[in-house]
Amino acid sequence: MDRQFKPLAGIRVVEMSHMIMGPSCGMFLGFLGAEVIKVEPPEGDKTRKLSGMGRPMFPLFNRGKKSVQLDLETECGREALHKLLGTADVFVENFRDASLSRMGADLERLRIDYPGLILASHKGFLQGPYQERTALDEVVQMMTGLAYMTGPSGRPLRVGSSANDIMGGLFGAFSVLAALLERQETGKGRNIRIGLFENCLLLVAQHMVQFELEGRNPPPMPERDFSWPVYDIFNTADRRQIFVGAVTEGQWAAMCKLLELDALLSDPRLLTRMDQIEARDWTVPIIEKAIAGREADGLLKAFEALGIPYSPISKPSDMYSDPHVMRPGGLATSRMPDGATFRAPSLPFEIDGVMLAGGGDLPAVGEDTDAVLSELGLDQREIAAARGAPKAEAA
């Protein structure tokens, strides 16, 4: 590229959110060049202190942001927030409306005070009977049928990532971009509300519409009616698991020839794809036995050469040795406040052949407070009063 792709350069985003949905929205906007100022309480975002599966949440979704501490329980903190919002183009939040009002960020009031400000509110539900409920990614997956479709009958299972939270943040960024375009013509902002539940509903829409069109509830994915002759996981001779798909007649023929299953090609019961699908109960065990006699590496190379869909069954950690992931630009390196580094995927698109690899580093708690607030005209005494002091944690 002749220059970096930063279409949101000059756009200031004030983000007051935690966990994943709101922070991921801010991260996406930051990747596109926006200045993202994360407002944290005096003791810092609680997500910073999570462990286990929660440990990567703050580092991953807050790369490249500035951190400003504000004690929004005080008048000084709330006044500083309003000064900051007066310079902002976008306000990203994911708190309950009542909590926002207590912190001096009542959404209706903000719309009056800052008519050009775009408010991106990430909530559990859009307006309706459920709008005051507490939601989590797992909750909405159970509510919408996504967990039902993911696990076998009687064992609903959430998908293996925070997919809804991340996708909700993506819809937040998507709607903010649209509102920014509109504001160029109107000069006015918008109140945007993004719903985690409605986001998940979109993910199960294909199954909803199948019911709408056919009048029957589709079975969970592990027990689904197959539309392809081969779409299964197999064990190889060297005890590796691989996924193999043969979804066209050409792929079926190529796979049978590779596995030396010529008898399947000449069997009059398997002349069409529908014949092959309906015969899965006896053909798949034959294919399973043939694959069990081959080692994975040679088999996978042959599948690739023939254009047959395949994949080894990988763990997330395997991605750090995957040649496609490790190509230039595939991962972005970020530095933590303590000097440690981590690598995370770049955004999944290319601009003029180049991925957006600049994830950015992690700010320490309040690292940018003095710089940002002094630009707003606050002196050192006012800054100290606005940022407050960390509160002692309960024993």
Image (cartoon, grey):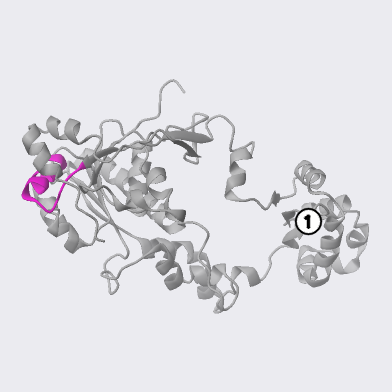
Q: Position of residue 97 (x, y in %)?
A: 19, 61
Residue 209 in sight in this render: no
The residue under label 1 is: 249
Q: Is residue 82 on the magenta stretch?
A: yes
Question: What is the number of callouts on the image?
Answer: 1
Nearer the observer, 268 or 42: 42
In this rendering, is residue 66 above or below 279? above
Residue 65 in sight in this render: yes
Residue at 38% over, 53% down? 50
Nearer the observer, 277 or 394: 394
Q: Position of residue 73 (x, y in %)?
A: 12, 54
Tell me if mark 1 has few (under 14), some (14-19) or many (20+) residues whose alpha carbon lies within 10 angstroms of its own.
Answer: some
Residue at 71% over, 62% down? 228
Q: Is residue 102 on the magenta stretch?
A: no
Bounds of the magenta span? 69-85
Label 1: which secondary element: helix
Nearer the observer, 183 or 293: 293
